[in-house]
Amino acid sequence: MAGDNFPGERIESLVDELEGIIDEAKPPFGKSAQFKVIETEVFYNILDEIRMSYPEEWQKSRRILKERDELMASATAQADSIIADAQQQALTIAGEQEIVRLAQQQADDIRERAQQYERETRYAAEDYAEQVFTHLEENLKSLTSTVARCRQQLNEGASNQNGSW
């Protein structure tokens, strides 16, 4: 059966053969070309071959359909796998970007808190220094005042004794 590569090809060639038999047949004497005389045995043999070819052709058709379905299922599974991998990679990248964003946000928060702490500490240190200097200045004024009074008393006492000696 050379050339039986496609489903239905054998049946088609047998039908063509039947058509050839009918075309070549001669009309009976005295009848129109509408009626023809054929060898029934040859005709029935070809019909039997057609009947026997049906299961074979159907099997070929089913095999081709099955192969097509398997190929489609494989392609679909492969496409689904590629899509799933791409989605996983996208999630991983998005997750990594989110981690980087959160780390940056935390670093910014820590930096801001450190700067705030530095400002508060500096202001507190300046306030403390101002209080210490103010207290020192008051003590120095009091001490200067005491020293001046003591000096005045010393001078007054020395003046009083100079005159009495």
Image (tube, grey):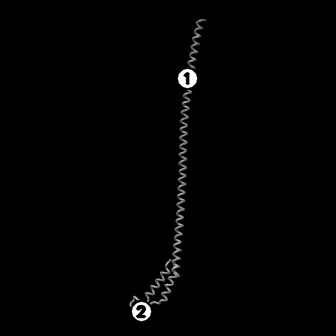
User: Camera-side residue: 104 or 56?
Assistant: 56
User: Camera-side residue: 44 or 19?
Assistant: 44
Labels 2 & 1 near each other (Cβ < 8 A): no
Q: Please tell me the numbered disc located at residue 138.
A: 1
> Is 30 left or right of 111, judged from the image as shown?
left
Most extreme residue toward the top is 164
Picture residue at 54% right of the left edge, 60% below the top: 84
- Classed neighbour count for the residue bearing mark 2: other residues with Cα under 10 Å, few (<14), some (14–19), many (≥20): few
Element type at mark 1: helix
Most extreme residue toward the right is 165
The residue type indicated by label 1 comes to Glu
Q: Please tell me the numbered disc located at residue 28.
A: 2
Residue 107 position in % (x across, y down): 55, 44
Q: Please tell me the numbered disc located at residue 161.
A: none
- Classed neighbour count for the residue bearing mark 1: other residues with Cα under 10 Å, few (<14), some (14–19), many (≥20): few
The residue type indicated by label 2 comes to Pro
The vertical placement of 154 against 72, above or below, is: above
Residue 14 position in % (x across, y down): 48, 83
Picture residue at 53% right of the left edge, 38% below the top: 116
The vertical placement of 44 against 129, above or below, is: below
Picture residue at 57% right of the left edge, 15% below the top: 149
Residue 83 position in % (x across, y down): 52, 60
Element type at mark 2: loop
> Is 124 left or right of 29, judged from the image as shown?
right
